[in-house]
Amino acid sequence: MLLMIPGPIEVAPTVLEAAAGAPASHVSPAFIEHFGSVLERMRTVWGAGPDAQPMVVAGGGTLAMEIAVTNVTDAGDRVLVVNTGYFGDRIADMFERRGAIVDHVRVEPGKAPTTAQVESALNSRRYKVMAVTHVDTSTGVRTDAEALAKLARAHNVLSIFDGVCATAGERFEMEAWGADVYLTASQKAIGLPPGLALLMMSARAVARRAELTQAPPMTLDLLQWKPIFDAYEQRKGSYFSTPATTLIKALDVGLGEIVNDGMDTVFARHQRVADAMRAAWKSMGLTLLADEGLAANTLSAIRYPEGVGPELTKAIKERGVIVAGGLHPDLKTEYFRVGHMGYSARRPDHLLSTVRAVAEGLVACGHNVDVEAAVKVAAAAL
Ligand SMILES: *Cc1c(COP(=O)(O)O)cnc(C)c1O
């Protein structure tokens, strides 16, 4: 079975091997070296400067979102959510639980707000924080993170980017673009099993945390964790709450492979793979949920063709490939999702097996497609 959903994804054998074996002590020399190396490598993958603060905490992407929200907002703060789907609603809910006042720039599923729409919202009120989903996994839409980060900076608004389905798959240059928080989880394009929340906070975000009147819950608090991360970066053991030693060791291996390839290579690979997959979908007569030019490189959200429904994902699974159903509440049963990020982006065999399974699944559902032609289109573009 091939796991081709938008996370968790297939994991490289090198990473799996690093995650096998007895857990290390959190103060063993080998683990201290792995953790220190992880924090350094994160800066490269995130495009972050030396004054940015990496964070690694056991948990998922949702926890990373909550760490971001609680460390940069106080009750009563005004927040702008650039909402492209399901995860925009989730972070808005978190801000409201924190007592912040949330406005949305909202669009229909499959679209993204224009930079001008966001700019006019930023001009209309004094916002403290703006939150953007880099790739909304519910719609397969990628926002223009560069333009939005620069816009927030120009308005002196702190920006949070949810990169859970993007980091290490879509270009992001935290320092150059002036973004303040970029967060993800281990099980998406980073290519690990689930279990780690990963964030990078700018010096501005760290300063904001220090000024808050309302401290975050203890285990989410950047100031509680910072001395620990500082110690490990200086290759010293330290303790606040036991880190996920096994996963952090595997993360060092996974990030090491990404850093060795180089970020330009990694982003170009995801672009090339996404172009190939989109060419294959097109050859089968399928259309994406995302508008032209907005489709993410890490996954495809694909509309079911006329006369076909969720039974397609079952037919695909019977052919050895697991894809995901819809997630956006407005059109859950109208589309399905295929992940093409991380390790599988380096495996043409995974990608071509997926194209074949989707094409054969469509045939099984009574939709006429040329299976061999679709596989050939993808193979030629990979
Ligand atoms: C998957 C995802 C999340 C949630 O991550 P969990 O690990 O499931 O908590 C948040 N945001 C985006 C954009 C995601 O794709």
Image (tube, rainbow, N blue to C red):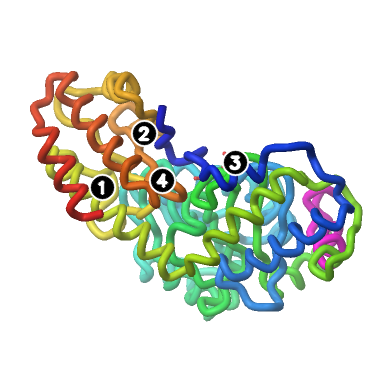
Amino acid type at mark 3 = Leu
- Disc 1 CB within 8 Å of nearest ligand 1 atom: no
Where are the magenta residues, as a range? 214-230
Nearer the observer, disc 4 or disc 1? Answer: 4
Residues packed near mark 3 inside 10 Å, few (<14), some (14 to 19) or many (20 plus)? some
Upstream in sequence: badge 3 or badge 4: 3
Amino acid type at mark 4 = Ser
| Dominant SS in magenta | helix
Upstream in sequence: badge 4 or badge 1: 1
Q: Which residue, given by chain and number where applicable, does mark 4 sit on? A: 344
Give yes or no for residue 218 being in the magenta stretch: yes
* Near-viewer residue (91 or 337): 337
Nearer the observer, disc 3 or disc 4? Answer: 3
User: Is 216 located above or below residue 311 in the figure?
Assistant: below
Q: CA distance from mark 4 to mark 1?
A: 12 Å
Describe the element under mark 1 as helix, strand or loop: helix
Q: Which residue, given by chain and number where applicable, does mark 2 sit on? A: 330
Upstream in sequence: badge 3 or badge 1: 3
* Near-viewer residue (305 or 361): 361
Q: CA distance from mark 4 to mark 2?
A: 30 Å
Nearer the observer, disc 1 or disc 2? Answer: 1
Image-quadrant location for residue 62: top right
Upstream in sequence: badge 1 or badge 2: 1
Identified at 80% across, 54% down, the residue is: 31
Amino acid type at mark 1 = Met
Q: Which residue, given by chain and number where applicable, does mark 1 sit on? A: 277
Q: CA distance from mark 3 to mark 2?
A: 37 Å
Q: Which residue, given by chain and number where applicable, does mark 3 sit on? A: 16
